[in-house]
Amino acid sequence: MVENSANPDLIVGFGTAIDMPSLQLLQDPDSSLELPEQPMPLGALSVTFIDARTGFVVWMGIATADIEETPDPELSRQRLQYVVTNMLSTLPE
């Protein structure tokens, strides 16, 4: 992938603890991709790829984790890097 803010093919969005219905994401009726309908829990991260031309979600990855009261910043960074790397490894080629 190459960043192109002038004429993108994909729009990449990410968030935590999202009220999914409020995003009003468009699901391609010809796709088998199922979008979550419930709000995401506090310890969740979603990464969404949206087709810039149609507005349809083409890929979504969701990860959940337990939230610690006093997280270690370095451990948190390592956990985030691990989960995002694994999440993106599920992208179709």
Image (cartoon, rainbow, N blue to C red):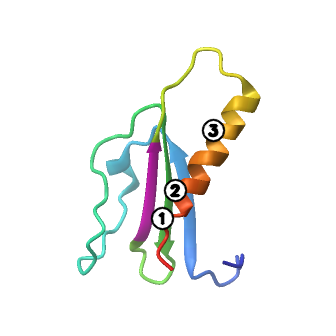
Magenta range is: 58-63
Structural distance between the alpha carbons of marks 1 and 2: 6 Å
Kind of residue indicated by mark 3:
Arg
Which residue lies at the image location 26% right of the left edge and 72% below the top edge?
32
Quarter of the image where one finds residue 68:
top right
Residue extending farthest to the top is 69
Residue 85 lies, with reference to residue 6, above or below; the image says above
| Mark 2 vs 3: CB contact within 8 A | no
Side of 40 relative to 90 (left or right): left
Numbered mark located on residue 79 in the image = 3
Circle 1: residue type: Thr
Count numbered badges in the picture.
3
Residue 35 covered by magenta stretch: no
- Residue 89 picture quarter: bottom right
Circle 1 — which element?
loop
Instruction: Give how far across and how far down residue 82 sits, in percent.
Output: 62, 46
Q: Which residue is mark 1?
A: 90
The three-letter code of the residue at mark 2 reads Met
Q: Looking at the picture, does residue 26 appear above or below residue 70? A: below
Image marks 1 and 2: residues in contact by CB distance under 8 Å: yes
- For the residues labelled 2 and 3, the Cα–Cα distance comes to 12 Å
Tell me if mark 2 has few (under 14), some (14-19) or many (20+) residues whose alpha carbon lies within 10 angstroms of its own.
Answer: some
At horizontal 49% and vertical 69% (from top left) the residue drawn is 91
**45 over 48 or under it: above or below:** above
